[in-house]
């Protein structure tokens, strides 16, 4: 009897879900005024606005705007949350890559392997050290760097690999560590989109010698401007980054390195301090929203709409929720974007041009066809609305709008 009741309850639940979607389709005009932004920062900030204002006010009253108490507090807290010993706040995620790699000993004459399918900041960070980025293709299903073929790019000059934890999903730690051991490579994680992501018992930023993260406002943990951090459990790397970010000075007016001015502002750290305790809950909200998307989009796989594969289960923090408008889809991606926009739904493309085909980096010697998976994804990927608090009703509307196109 219990089984019969559970089955009946499940049928009712599925029926209600279908009825909700069907009703939305039947009343498109009624819902045409519904606006779903790609990211809704107001929704995230409103409940904690008073705390944020108080934290900023405290910094103003204290007057320690550069390398102040709030920064030290945040560095310690975020490092602990990420499972490492040290966090060093810098002015951007790009600088976190550059300074972190430099502190790990990467420089001119070295080759650093990076995926072709990433934001250009990954390449810029490597180039700023004087090293040469060597690109490899990505996996078509996960969009992550293809570790199965990475060894083909390794030469005697290869010193490091920068796995990018793209869209909020980590590159597999066991395979990374095995690769590093077999080829004596430094692992430096680009975790700019993967705050507190987890996989195989590891937290993003704790796999390699060091890692870089960004606090750009739309990130899972975002500041009110630019910001970044280097994470490491290596005390020497931490000490080096602290010096490099502050004119190369381990102490005032004593310069041991040719550094730069790249410090995370105390005011930004104060904002991040307020937001950090909410991050795990926000990540869970994103993951639940993604699962709802996955369930509703299943019937559309036959139409060539394929979500990027999640190999991390609950550990995926979904900075972005990305689908592929594959070659089997009867509609073009641009058409889908335009139709969704007409229904008040904002979307994005991350990213429309692979790194090796960007005009500024033609000098690296790559050409069209070198990385077919990355090039295919750039033509297919479409990012749907994703942020903490995105409701099932909103997701239903997005997916129903997609269904109506077919």
Image: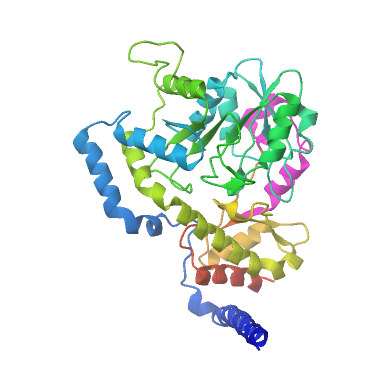
Q: Where is residue 320 in the image (x, y as percent from the top left)?
A: 56, 52
Prevailing secondary structure of the magenta residues: helix
Viewer-closest of 365 and 84:
84
Q: Can residue 296 be seen in this view?
A: yes
**Residue 297 sits above or below residue 133 on the image:** below
Q: Where is residue 264 in the image (x, y as percent from the top left)?
A: 38, 32
Viewer-closest of 323 and 84:
84
Q: Residue at x 60, y 69 (%)?
A: 399
Quarter holding residue 41 = bottom left
**Residue 374 sits above or below residue 337 on the image:** above
Q: Which residue is drawn at 54% across and 81% down?
A: 27
Quarter holding residue 208 = top right
**Residue 8 sits above or below residue 260 on the image:** below
Q: Which residue is drawn at 69% across and 67% down?
A: 298
Q: Give the range drawn in magenta.
A: 355-382
Outermost residue toward the front in this view: 1
Outermost residue toward the bottom in this view: 1
Q: Which colour scheme is used?
A: rainbow
* 362 inside magenta stretch: yes
Viewer-closest of 341 and 237:
237
* 237 inside magenta stretch: no
Horizontal side of 218 relative to 141 (left or right) equals left
Check the picture and name the quadrant holding the C terminus. bottom right
Q: Can residue 224 be seen in this view?
A: no
Q: Where is residue 123 in the image (x, y as percent from the top left)?
A: 61, 30
Horizontal side of 236 relative to 309 (left or right) equals left
Check the picture and name the quadrant holding the N terminus. bottom right
Horizontal side of 203 relative to 222 (left or right) equals right
């Amino acid at each position: 009897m219990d089984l019969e009741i559970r089955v009946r309850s499940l049928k009712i639940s599925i029926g209600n879900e279908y009825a909700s979607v069907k009703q939305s389709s039947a009343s498109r005009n009624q819902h045409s005024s519904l606006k779903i932004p790609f990211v809704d920062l107001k929704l995230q900030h409103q409940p904690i606005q008073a705390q944020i204002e108080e934290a900023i006010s405290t910094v103003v009253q204290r007057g320690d705007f550069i390398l102040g108490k709030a920064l030290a507090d945040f560095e310690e807290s975020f490092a602990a949350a990420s499972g490492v010993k040290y966090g060093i706040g810098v002015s951007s995620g790009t600088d976190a890559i550059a300074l972190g790699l430099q502190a790990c000993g990467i420089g001119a004459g070295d080759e650093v392997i990076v995926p072709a399918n990433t934001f250009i900041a990954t390449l810029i960070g490597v180039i700023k050290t004087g090293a040469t980025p060597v690109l490899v293709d990505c996996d078509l299903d996960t969009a992550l760097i293809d570790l199965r073929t990475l060894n083909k790019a390794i030469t005697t000059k290869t010193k490091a690999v920068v796995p990018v934890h793209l869209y909020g999903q980590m590159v597999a730690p066991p395979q990374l560590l095995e690769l590093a051991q077999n080829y004596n490579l430094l692992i430096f994680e680009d975790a700019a989109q993967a705050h507190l992501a987890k996989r195989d018992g590891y937290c993003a930023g704790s796999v390699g010698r060091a890692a870089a993260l960004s606090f750009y406002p739309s990130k899972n943990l975002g500041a009110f401007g630019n910001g970044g951090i280097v994470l490491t459990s290596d005390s020497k790397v931490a000490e080096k980054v602290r010096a490099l970010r502050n004119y190369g000075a381990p102490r005032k007016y004593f310069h041991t390195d040719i550094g730069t001015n790249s410090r995370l502002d105390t005011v930004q750290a104060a904002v991040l301090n307020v937001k950090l305790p909410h991050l795990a809950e926000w990540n869970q909200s994103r993951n639940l929203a993604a699962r709802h998307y996955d369930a509703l989009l299943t019937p559309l796989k036959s139409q060539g709409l394929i979500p990027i594969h999640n190999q991390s289960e609950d550990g995926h923090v979904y900075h972005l929720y990305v689908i592929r408008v594959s070659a089997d889809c009867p509609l073009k991606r641009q058409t889908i974007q335009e139709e969704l926009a007409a229904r008040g739904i904002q979307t994005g493309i991350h990213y429309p041009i692979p790194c090796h085909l960007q005009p500024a980096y033609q000098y690296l010697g790559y050409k069209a066809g070198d990385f077919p998976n990355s090039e295919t994804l750039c033509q297919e990927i479409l990012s749907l609305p994703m942020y903490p608090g995105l409701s099932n009703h909103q997701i239903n509307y997005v997916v129903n709008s997609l269904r109506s196109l077919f």
